[in-house]
């Protein structure tokens, strides 16, 4: 891994350019909402991303097929590790 790729690996979504962002008139309320969202468990874990990448590779090679499904949106009060596990079952 070279220095450039290491720097990219350390980048977060906050380091990426954001286009078409709304103006939030209350910066403190925005910080509170972000803090609340950050308190929720992750929707996916790193190992799951690696597994998905490998499985999507198999789809791209014609070795598997993709069946995609899920909710269009979940309510924030339904975001917990238990709710996520139950939905996946």
Image (cartoon, rainbow, N blue to C red):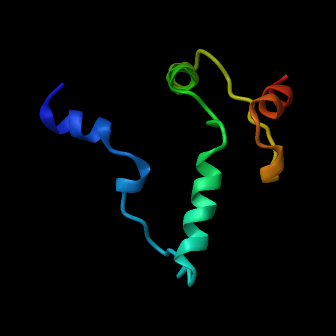
Look at the image and tell me whether residue 87 can be seen.
yes
Rendering quarter of residue 70? top right
Q: Nearer the viewer, residue 22 or 40?
A: 40
The residue lying at 22 percent from left, 33 percent from top is: 6
Residue 29 locus on image (x, y percent): 61, 72
Residue 57 locus on image (x, y percent): 50, 23
The residue lying at 60 percent from left, 63 percent from top is: 32
Count of marks, rendered view: 0
Q: Is residue 3 above or below residue 71?
A: above
Residue 47 locus on image (x, y percent): 53, 20
Look at the image and tell me whether residue 74 can be seen.
no
- Quarter containing the N terminus: top left
Q: Residue furthest left?
A: 3
The residue lying at 55 percent from left, 65 percent from top is: 31
Residue 39 locus on image (x, y percent): 63, 45
Q: Is residue 53 above or below residue 11?
A: above
Q: Is residue 60 left or right of residue 5?
A: right
Q: Residue furthest top?
A: 63
The residue lying at 69 percent from left, 28 percent from top is: 66
Q: Is residue 9 left or right of residue 71?
A: left
Q: Is residue 31 above or below residue 20?
A: above
- Quarter containing the C terminus: top right
Rendering quarter of residue 24? bottom right
Q: Nearer the viewer, residue 62 or 50?
A: 50
């Amino acid at each position: 891994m070279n220095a450039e790729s290491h720097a990219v690996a350390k980048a977060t979504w906050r380091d990426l350019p954001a286009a078409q962002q709304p103006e939030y008139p209350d910066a403190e309320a925005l910080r509170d909402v972000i803090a609340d969202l950050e308190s929720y468990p992750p929707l996916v874990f790193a190992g799951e991303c690696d597994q998905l990448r490998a499985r999507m590779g198999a789809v791209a090679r014609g070795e598997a097929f993709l069946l995609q499904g899920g909710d269009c949106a979940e309510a924030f009060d339904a975001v917990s590790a238990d709710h996520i596990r139950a939905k996946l079952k």
